Image (cartoon, helix red, strand yellow):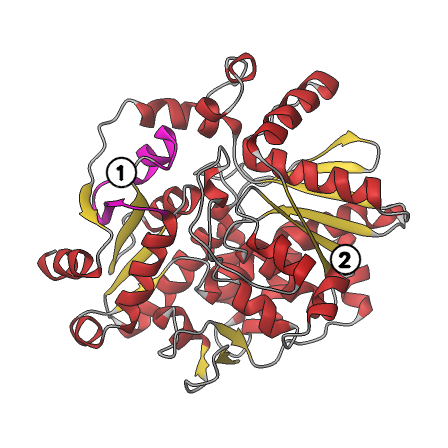
Amino acid sequence: MKLYSTQRKSEDVNFEEAVFKGLPPDNGLYLPSVLPLLPLDFWHSLESKSFQEMAFLYANELLKDEIPENILKEIVYETLSFEIPIIETEENMYVMELFQGPSLAFKDFGARFMARIMSYFLSISKKEINILVATSGDTGGAVAMGFFNSPGIKVTILYPSGKVSNLQEKQLTTLGANIHALEVNGTFDDCQKLVKEAFLDAELNSKMNLSSANSINIARLIPQAFYYLYAYSILKSENIPLVFSVPSGNFGNIGAGLIAKKMGLPIDKFIASTNANNIVPQYLKTGIFNPRPSVRTISNAMDVGNPSNFARIHDLYSGNLEEVRKDVVGYWFDDIQTEKAMQDVYEKVDYLMCPHTAVAYLGLKKYQEECKEKSTGVFLGTAHPAKFMHEMPSNLSNKVIIPDSLANIALKPKTSTKINAEFADLKNYLFKN
């Protein structure tokens, strides 16, 4: 498996190199040079396979030249050790709960898979690495738990001060050991910019082995396709077009789905549902990609003003906007609409959604209302509502049952280091620690 940079100014690399580099030297993103087109028989037979089995077969098509089958199978089965409920909320509308893992967020799929992939490679090379990751909320907790006490791996998580929920913050600031948190005086975009600058700094990279755990790392994207396969296997018997509404911030989640579609997964449409940080929906409407500073919303994990993975989506379609539009439609919703959706769904079907899931619900609802063709729709439940109780309407937040894992972590004191959104501050911290 060879991977190239979307900027096409760096040399192609193998999977191990891409995983540990995270970001190519030319500041692009890695993508596989060849995406195998899997036959219809593969997709049509998914319903006869377990979730773990279909995920392994998919991953093996990409990585069979990089990781021995028995090792990869073990990694996939360990990663997918929890259930994924698919619940009907209305006729032809389903929520897929991706928050049943340790950190109660969909990021567990990518973080756990990547941690095990890295540990496998490090067990052979006997090297040590330093992982840098920026988080707008859920990535930090998933990475912290996925890499906690992993031999040879030190993790530094950058998060925007005051812009993540209390429980999100506790998940990434209370573990200790090899997990370190930097509280940045800025936005998520500032955190992401600092991480990218670190990978491009020659002096830093000459003295430290740096890697990323953000969705800029290809090892995060591969496992995020697994649950699209699973939903297809469960719902394909309805024999009408299948669409997914994806709450989108940095666009790694939808990027993983589009890679699977390029490999043959029979999905009719992806709905890019965003909050007021609507850069991609505006691009789909106008053809202009115009990044701007992010604005704060109640769906904070999606507060991204310059989504990194847009580069991958753009490259997958060779920059052809009309081809992107065939597979992706974009909508955006403000906080008032999001709060109303949480209220409406609870009143209709007694189901509690976090704000991000509510945005995905709204996107699916709007698409199905506008589209003349009947479809089976899945909106992604990306986080447990207990993580966002302060962002939910008060009459709903008091109905949320807090899982024991969150209740326990809420009592722990946080440990973080405050820095300004200046690369010199990050660089000094890394050299000293």
Which residue sits at x=26%, y=52%?
A: 156
- Which sits in the foreground, 9 or 120? 9
Q: Is residue 403 visible?
A: no
- Residue 170 magenta: yes
Residue 51 located within the stretch drawn in magenta? no
Residue 43, position as x, y percentages in the image: 77, 62
Q: Secondary structure at mark 2?
A: loop
Name which of mark 1 and mark 2 comes first in the sequence. Answer: 1
**Residue assigned mark 1:** 173
Give 40 or 56, whichever is nearer the viewer. 40
Disc 1 crowd, CA 10 A, few/some/many (<14, 14-19, 20+): many
Is residue 23 at least partly visible in the picture?
yes
**Residue type at tag 2:** Ile
Q: Is residue 400 above or below residue 225?
A: above
Q: Which residues are magenta?
A: 163-187
Q: Secondary structure at mark 1?
A: helix
Amino acid marked by disc 1? Thr
- Please provide percent x and percent y for residue 162: 32, 35
Count of marks, rendered view: 2
Q: Which residue is mark 2?
A: 267
Tell me what residue is drawn at x 49 percent, y 40 percent: 105
Tell me if 364 is positioned left or right of 219 in this view. right
* Residue 432 in which image quadrant: bottom left
Q: Depth check: give the residue in front, 2 or 192.
A: 192
Q: Residue at x 22, y 41 (%)?
A: 176
